[in-house]
Image (cartoon, grey):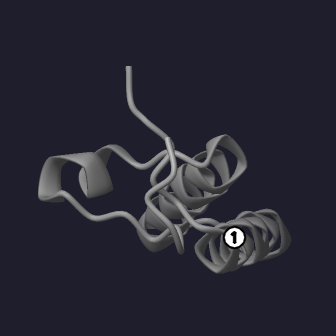
Amino acid sequence: MFDVNVGTADRIVRIVFGALLLAMFFMVEAGPWGWVMALVGAVLLATGLASRCALYSLLGIDTRGSKAT
């Protein structure tokens, strides 16, 4: 469906921040912003693990170093 468009550095940042946001959600009292934080964290973690970002595909962004297919 979507081609790989997330580079290594971008993946690492997404995975780290996604995991941190999810951990913060489970450690603090979750109000409305807590749920937003959890959703953003889950999306970042999922896109980092999958190396695919739908928004990047729509915008034509590719953070990989080379355009190898």
Would you name the residue on which mark 1 appears? 8
Give the position of the N terminus as an image quadrant. top left
Whole-percent x, y for residue 23 in the image = 82, 69
Q: Nearer the viewer, residue 22 or 68?
A: 68
Which residue is rendered at x = 67% and y = 73% of the image? 21
Question: How far across and how far down the image is residue 60, in percent?
Answer: 19, 57
Residue 14 in which image quadrant: bottom right
| Tally of numbered discs | 1
Task: Using the image, determine if residue 39 lies above or below residue 16.
Answer: above
In which image quadrant can residue 38 be found? bottom right
Percent position of residue 54, x then y: 32, 43
* Coordinates of residue 20 in the picture (x, y in percent): 77, 76
The residue located at (74%, 74%) in the rendering is 12
Amino acid bearing label 1 = Thr
Q: Residue furthest top?
A: 1
Farthest residue, direction left: 59
Q: Secondary structure at mark 1?
A: helix
Residue drawn 67% across and 80% down?
9
Q: Is residue 52 left or right of residue 45?
A: left
User: Relative to 67, is 48 on the left or the right?
Assistant: right
**Image side of residue 57 versus residue 38, left or right:** left
Residue depicted at x 60% and y 62% = 41
Up the image or down, 20 lies above or below 32; here it is below
Crowd class of label 1 (few under 14; some 14 to 19; many from 20; radius 10 Å): some
